[in-house]
Image (cartoon, grey):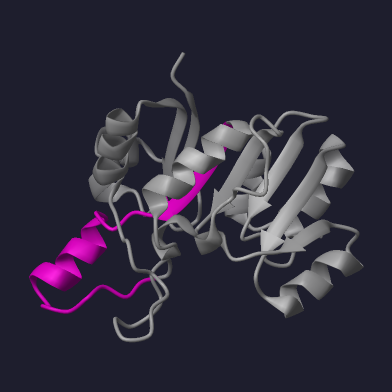
Amino acid sequence: MTLRGDLVLIRDLINANARVLDLGCGTGDLLANLQTTKNVNGYGLDKDPANIQVCLSKGVNVIEQDLDTGLSNFADNNFNMVVMTDALQAVRDPRGLLREMLRIGEECVVTFPNFGHWRCRLQLGLGGQMPVSKHLPHDWFNTPNIHLCTTQDFERLCREENFRIIQRRVVNTQYTEHWSIQLAPNLFGSHAFYRLGRTA
């Protein structure tokens, strides 16, 4: 099975034989691939019963759970890596969930669409309408996204919370890096990947 481009970037950040928790794991593509390619001991959380059935059919360990209920059912330091792909902007308490991710995991990987991308700014500034794009495909009235942010917003939160940014990759819509994005990631990057750890 071929992984989506964003999941390939996440896979590359995870060490072999790691214990991984994937929050909002969907149909389990990432975990299934990690089990095969990196011998990862993985668990997924998802609230959609249909997704859970697909995960089980792939041999992925999955728990039915809404991320908005928190992660109190997991012990401290239970995982090497906790992953959350494109869900940060859709949860009720992003700050609290990030704290919990770094409580139960040594590190975490978080990805989200960058609302500071120039196309978003153009649609809002010139068109006067909430942006719709590949990474933000919903209209304002039916979007699951309730906490949209930019890379600058996210990094300010990391400073306030003393989350250590181990690695950052900001990419275009094809999930590739470009020199222009490196010059101005908040303006030219459509999607952000952050690998975070605790501050010593």
Q: Is 127 on the left or on the right of 155, as rendered?
A: left
* x and y percentages locating residue 55 in the rendered image: 81, 65
- 196 or 37: nearer the eye? 196
Q: Residue furthest top?
A: 200
Magenta-drawn stretch contains 108: yes
- 71 or 188: nearer the eye? 71
Residue beneath the point at 38% across and 69% down: 145
Quarter of the image with the N terminus in it:
bottom right
Q: How many marks?
A: 0
Q: Is residue 176 visible?
A: no
- 190 or 51: nearer the eye? 51
Q: Which residues are magenta?
A: 107-133
Residue beneath the point at 34% across and 68% down: 146
* x and y percentages locating residue 167 in the rendered image: 47, 28
Residue beneath the point at 34% across and 48% down: 189
Magenta-drawn stretch contains 128: yes
Q: Is 101 on the left or on the right of 17, as rendered?
A: left
* x and y percentages locating residue 147 in the rendered image: 32, 61
Q: Is 85 on the left or on the right of 35, as rendered?
A: left
On the image, which quarter does residue 78 sit in?
top right
- 36 or 25: nearer the eye? 25
Q: Is 133 on the left or on the right of 54, as rendered?
A: left
Looking at the picture, does residue 138 appear above or below residue 61? below
On the image, which quarter does residue 60 sit in?
bottom right
Looking at the picture, does residue 122 appear above or below residue 11? below
On the image, which quarter does residue 18 sit in?
top right
Residue beneath the point at 25% across and 41% down: 152
Q: Residue furthest bottom?
A: 141
Q: Is residue 42 visible?
A: yes
* x and y percentages locating residue 46 in the rendered image: 67, 65
